[in-house]
Image (tube, rainbow, N blue to C red):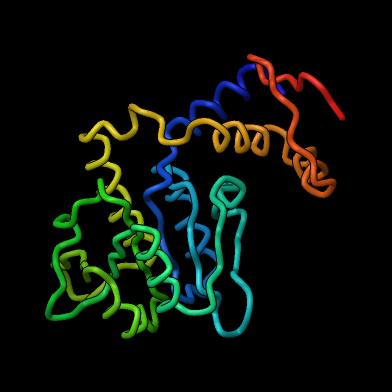
Amino acid sequence: MTPERYAKIRRVLSLRQPTLSVLMDEVNKPHNLSAILRTCDAVGVMGAHAVPPKNGGVPTFGATSGSADKWVEVTTHTDALSAVQTLQAQGFQVLATHLSEASVDYRVPDYTRPTCVLLGAEKWGVSSEAAQAADANIVVPMMGMVQSLNVSVAAAVILFEAQRQRLEAGMYATPQLTGEALERLTFEWAYPELAGLYRERGEAYPALGEEGEVLSLA
């Protein structure tokens, strides 16, 4: 661990936004899911959510994600409706990318609120039950012959609007991760293999020095 690497980890974690997330409803193409994770990392999303495709497993594609899956933890859910309800119970507004009579331009919602963007697979979209349960349906206005964007492109457009609003509100200027959560993630990002050993043994992580050195090893 070099001091420069440690400084970058601390800087990136200081910009993370635990109150911004995405929920991928059966996004089944690895390059789409991984591209979404790459955008999540780029705008500071702390963790994402996914309903695995019915054929099993959440697909990944490291070459496309640029290893973003290392930095954005993905929590899986059994179905989109229960995932929406769980996120709402945690205080998130859920915005479903879904065309309906009640749909609004994706720039209308307030993304400075705790927000999760619900995205569906290109062929099927978001399930109707999840779209109805969402706090709002949003769309990206289309001026051409096609009716929708690639799901990973739509995710990028929406997440960068969220970033724009949060930058204007100063939400990246004040770290949202502090205390124990910040120290835990710093150790896990800096020393992932060592962190795994400590978790297996059920032991607390050792403290780190100012330049990222491990101060003591058990």
Which residue lies at the image location 62% right of the left edge and 55% below the top edge? Answer: 62
Which residue lies at the image location 80% right of the left edge and 46% below the top edge? Answer: 202
Q: Of residues 46 and 33, which is closer to you in this image?
A: 46
Which residue lies at the image location 17% right of the left edge and 55% below the top edge? Answer: 107
Give coordinates of residue 2: x percent, y percent.
69, 19
Give coordinates of residue 159: x percent, y percent.
32, 52
Q: Of residues 45 and 141, which is closer to you in this image?
A: 45
Q: Which quadrant would residue 172 be assigned to in this image?
A: top left
Give the left or right position of residue 187, taking residue 105 as reference. Answer: right
Which residue lies at the image location 34% right of the left edge and 62% below the top edge? Answer: 117
Quadrant where the C terminus is found in the figure = top right
Q: Of residues 172 and 40, which is closer to you in this image?
A: 172
Give coordinates of residue 120: x percent, y percent.
39, 74
Give the left or right position of residue 214, taking residue 91 as reference. Answer: right
Give coordinates of residue 163: x percent, y percent.
30, 43
Q: Is residue 116 above or below residue 10?
A: below
